[in-house]
Amino acid sequence: MTRRLLLSHLSLMLFVLLALEVPFGVFYARSELSRFSHAAQQGAMTLAEVCEDKMEHGLAADLPGLARAYGRRTGSRVLVADRRGIVLTDTAARARAGRDVSAEPGVPAALRGRPAVGTGSDPSAGGAVLFVAVPGGSDAAVACVVRTTYLLRPLTSKVHATWLVLAAAGLGVLAAVSVIGFALARSVTRPLQALERATAQLAEGRLTDPPAADQGPPELRRLAVSFTRTATRLQHLLQAQQAFASEASHQLKTPLTSLRLRLENFEPHLAPCARDSLDQALGELERLSRMVQGLLALARLENSAIRPEAVDLQAVVADRAAIWAAFADEQDVGLVVSGAAAVRVWAVPGALEQIVDNLLSNALRVSPPGTVITLATVAPEEAGRTPAMAELHVTDQGPGMTEAERQRAFDRFWRAADADHDGTGLGLPMVRHLTRAGGGEVTLEAAPGGGLDAVVLLRPAGNRAHRAHGPADVVPASRPTPAR
């Protein structure tokens, strides 16, 4: 931002300097040429009057000396011709008298009694020249013509020197404006950079370097004060929520455990007809315990500063499938693992295991005996997605879900209307949270031939966006107990 502010400031100043200096330089060059031309014309007219007077008094022999003296004094080449355009004298080194110059630049107009001023190129003189031709006498009786020629190199050098002075002055002004503009830009961007760092820290859940409230413009100072007050309040609220989650984990587990023991102690004293009610009460108590554990796990996930790390997807899938194989065998359900041999993805530490556990637990709940659950991994180059994402498919052959049910399946505590299992409705919300924490996404799709296909999209470990993360304190989420 400092660079953009400085560039915009300098661009505006450069435009102003160009708008002022370029017209001034052009005007100066033209005015110098006009002044030089006017002075040359006045001198030539004076010399023409003297030459006319000499010729009227029969002193034409004085013209060469007069022309040489004038040429030395003014630094010009002087040519004097009679009324027919025949050269009487010429101060040029190799010029000869007696030649006809009636057709050369400026002479025809002077022979008709009108002064002529112009510029041209004269290789013999060494470059661009200014010539002035004036008549000696009136329109009716032009006794002679005087033409003076001046090299424009000195005038051009003077104009160039003026342009250099203007350029140096412009550069000096730009340098001074750059220093001032940089100081002003820094005074504005430094508080913004501090706010950016503080915002990044707050996003990580901890504000260790609040922005200074005594730097920058008044608006940014007030913004820094408001941000610090808001961040402090948010931190207090987060700390209170974390403290509640931590304390609730102890306060809720103890009465639930005590209630379970009391209910189990009733078993020897109950009539056989009441045992079913006791079993149902114990089942609801077990479901309540799992729900409390799920809520606490979600609370810890949402309040923890977690960073993804590179994980071998195929290794995790194979490991979890081996652990769940025994539970699947008890229900006469097969587990099949297929897909890419080695795919490294970004995931929160311990999250990928929980994702597979929750999806397998849900799949086993709805899988009829004799069916198969497939865990398939797809490498990013095989998935063909943009951007490139690795895929994990957990596909069952159960009853599946409707489109409306698949859209609501990730809501907390939501359960299908025809669900006959003791799920808590927190498994899929936890899967989504863990997946998004690693930069991925999870969706539910209808499986070919019936059933449900849980698709977990994970960023490949070669993604540079995640490599930019530095090390951080990681609080792994609690691992749910596999449900049978």
Image: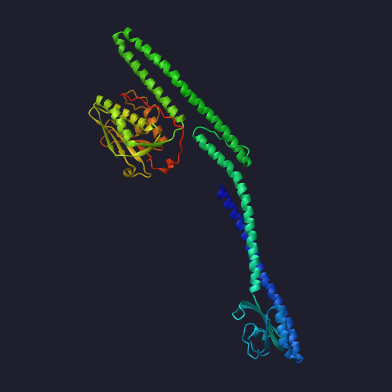
Q: Residue furthest top?
A: 269
| Residue 402 visible from this viewpoint | no
Considering the image in quadrants, where does the C terminus appear?
top left
Which residue is at the front of the view, 133 or 348?
348
Q: Is residue 434 above or below residue 31?
A: above
| In this rendering, position of residue 263 left or right of residue 158 | left
Instruction: State which quadrant residue 108 falls in.
Output: bottom right
Q: Residue at x 44, y 19 (%)?
A: 250
Q: Residue at x 70, y 72 (%)?
A: 35
**How is colour applied across the structure in the image?**
rainbow
Q: Residue furthest bottom?
A: 58
Q: Is residue 181 above or below residue 80?
A: above
Q: Is residue 66 above or below residue 249?
A: below
Q: Is residue 164 above or below residue 119?
A: above
| In this rendering, position of residue 481 left or right of residue 91 | left
Instruction: State which quadrant residue 441 falls in.
Output: top left
Q: Residue at x 60, y 49 (%)?
A: 182
Count all numbered tags in the image, as a single digit. Answer: 0
Which residue is at the front of the view, 248 or 423?
248
Place of residue 129 in the rendered image (x, y in percent of width and height, measured from the top left) = 63, 77
Instruction: State which quadrant residue 163 falls in.
Output: bottom right
Place of residue 178 in the rendered image (x, y in percent of width and height, measured from the top left) = 61, 52
| Residue 326 visible from this viewpoint | yes
Q: Residue furthest right?
A: 57
Place of residue 341 in the rendered image (x, y in percent of width and height, measured from the top left) = 29, 39
Which residue is at the front of the view, 79 or 8?
79
Place of residue 207 in the rendered image (x, y in percent of width and height, measured from the top left) = 53, 33
